[in-house]
Image (cartoon, helix red, strand yellow):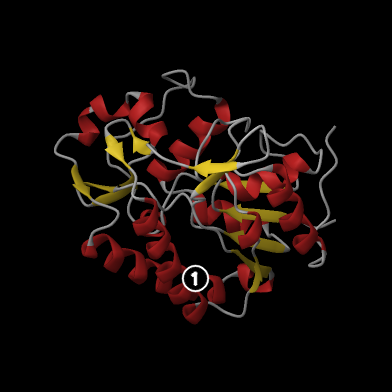
Amino acid sequence: MPRVAILGSCITRDVWRFRGAGVTEPMPDLLYISRTSLPSLFATPVAGFRPDAQPPGGLRPQQHRALSTDLRKTALAELVAFRPTHLIFDFIDERYDLLSVAGALVANSWELATSGYLRQPAFEGARVIPRLSAACERLWLEAAGELAAFVRATSLAEARLILHSAQWAERQRLANGRTAAVGGMQILEGQPADIAAHNALLRRYEAAFAELMPPMARVEAPTRRLADPTHQWGLSPFHYTADYYREIWTQLDRLEIQAPVAA
């Protein structure tokens, strides 16, 4: 039975949901690591941070696990311990700014803002590194090289590596079948999103990553990249229509990935 690890975002995790596996929480044969960034993976843990016993701020358990994993820097150990047969990367979560916190780096995600953890003394003096800045891009490229070396040096080298190439959708499919522009999107409240700039960044990320990493398979569905206003998680440039996920599943299926069966 394949053991699939996702280091990415909901666009890959939702492929299983559209296959009818009902995946909204992690399953035994599917490890999902999200709401992080490559520089954050290799940073030191946030000194003095302690997660609450119960998800704060109305977060779901999976959201809180993802946030705690990023702040405590346990993702790489979890990946190695899981021993995946397939490891899928996507970079849609690489939209959040980074926070520099007393020598640590974390993703300034919606979950972090919602949790209330930023009010903890551990985050005093946190400094924002804007995602679209040259400094953030340098940090990301350095971390991509570290990840490539880490994969080669660990059991992850035995996994089938897959890049899920994705972009933010510029248009949405309406109920009448027509399309309209996706506009007015924000990464966080009060932080407008520049779709073209983020798509250009994703192209640079993917090109650099492909050069650094061991050989990877690639799945993509550029002609089916339309946002879905009725998506379970709401309208977003990376919440696509169902046919997008089905096409990606078809491509993954050729790489001998089988959907886990929900209990």
Of 25 and 133, the residue lying toward us: 133
Which percent across, then down, holds residue 96? 36, 46
Residue at x 61%, y 38% (from the top left corner): 228
Residue at x 42%, y 68% (from the top left corner): 205
Position of residue 144 in the picture relative to residue 6 (left or right):
left
Looking at the rendered structure, the kind of residue marked 1 is Phe
Q: Disc 1 designates what residue?
A: 150
Which percent across, then down, holds residue 244? 69, 51
Element under disc 1? helix
| Residue 238 visible in the picture | no
Image quarter (top left, top right, bottom left or bottom right) of the C terminus: top right
Which percent across, then down, holds residue 61? 56, 27
Position of residue 224 in the picture relative to residue 39 (left or right):
right
Image quarter (top left, top right, bottom left or bottom right) of the N terminus: bottom right
Residue at x 38%, y 25% (from the top left corner): 115
Q: How many marks?
A: 1
| Residue 224 visible in the picture | yes
Position of residue 19 in the picture relative to residue 4 (left or right):
right
> Quadrant location of residue 101?
top left
Q: Is residue 105 above or below residue 112?
A: below
As drawn, which residue projects farthest toward the left? 125
Which percent across, then down, holds residue 156? 62, 68
> Quadrant location of residue 152?
bottom right
Residue at x 68%, y 60% (from the top left corner): 83
Q: Is residue 111 above or below residue 52?
A: below
Neighbour tally class for label 1: few under 14, some 14-19, many 20 plus, Cα within 10 Å: some
Q: Is residue 224 above or below residue 67?
A: below
